[in-house]
Amino acid sequence: MVTPPAQPQVNIFSDSQQQTHFAEICNALYERELITLAHQPISNISLLQRKLGGLRHHVKRAAYHFIHHTGPLSVDVHNASWQAKQSATCMGRRHDKDKTHQWFVQYARSGLPVVIYVKNINGEHLELDSIDRIDTDTQQLHSNKFGWFAMNGNNDIDRVSSNIRDHAALGKYVLLRPSNAIFSAACCGHTWNHKGRSHPRTLTLRELLLSGSINWKNFR
């Protein structure tokens, strides 16, 4: 029996720039997340094992969102980050309570990605979060990280998340009415200080996954 000649090894990334970008994004995310985990004070070994066990799945999901993005943002494949032009001032300052209330009364649902305006001693930024509970009796929404907000965007200091409560006196938190500009600034990590535009912050893996669930066609 004649053995066929060995075929040359094929580089799976050579025939697709998309696959190359996917690999670059995954590498950047792995490096970032492993550094983050290494600096977290995790004493529970089983918790660390669960985080590491789920890392592959979450990284691939985030990379998929980057590659298949159809919204207004550009992608930096080397740093695994979203890119868009930054406004001179933070649009979170222009908070219209009436329009915010009207929007959330009509469209609020569990799992919906939202944006929180954060102002503290370090400056201002917009942060991605998601709705995980709606209290129709009190007309309030609960976001996964920041806690309870009225439909008009004001946060309820008495029902705010415990990890935020200790810093509440040092900061301001407002639930914003979604828009393309609001989501773009949050996804890109835009920050501002007393001088104006500041260096963008790095989004957590959780925020990157939330950014992939935004339906950009719903916002203007």
Image (cartoon, grey):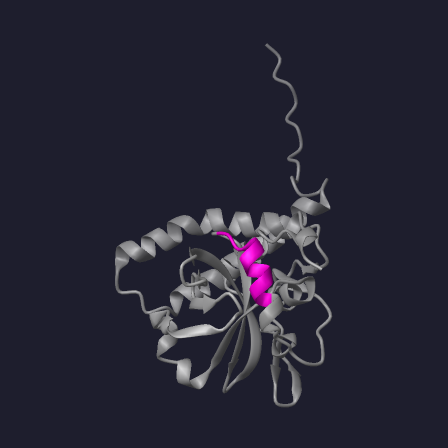
Give above or below for 81 relative to 170. above
State the residue lying farthest toward the bottom. 195
In the image, is 24 to the left or to the right of 141? Answer: right
Q: 111 and 102: which one is in front?
A: 102
- Tell me what residue is drawn at x 64 percent, y 26 percent: 6
- Tell me what residue is drawn at x 35 percent, y 79 percent: 166
Q: Position of residue 53 (x, y in %)?
A: 38, 49
Q: 79 and 123: which one is in front?
A: 123
Whether residue 213 appears in magenta in the rendering, the answer is no
Q: 175 and 15: which one is in front?
A: 175
Q: Position of residue 139 (x, y in %)?
A: 45, 62
Residue 162 position by quadrant: bottom left
Q: Position of residue 215 (x, y in %)?
A: 63, 51
- Tell me what residue is drawn at x 64 percent, y 35 percent: 9
Give the magenta range. 100-109
User: Is residue 75 visible in this depiction of the protein?
Assistant: yes
Q: Position of residue 164 (x, y in %)?
A: 39, 74
User: Is residue 27 visible in this depiction of the protein?
Assistant: no
Residue 13 position by quadrant: top right
Q: Main secondary structure of the magenta part?
A: helix
Q: 7 and 97: which one is in front?
A: 97
Which quadrant does the N terminus fall into?
top right
In the image, is 9 to the left or to the right of 139? Answer: right
State the residue lying farthest toward the front. 137
- Tell me what residue is drawn at x 55 percent, y 60 percent: 104
Which quadrant does the C terminus fall into?
bottom right
Whether residue 104 appears in magenta in the rendering, the answer is yes
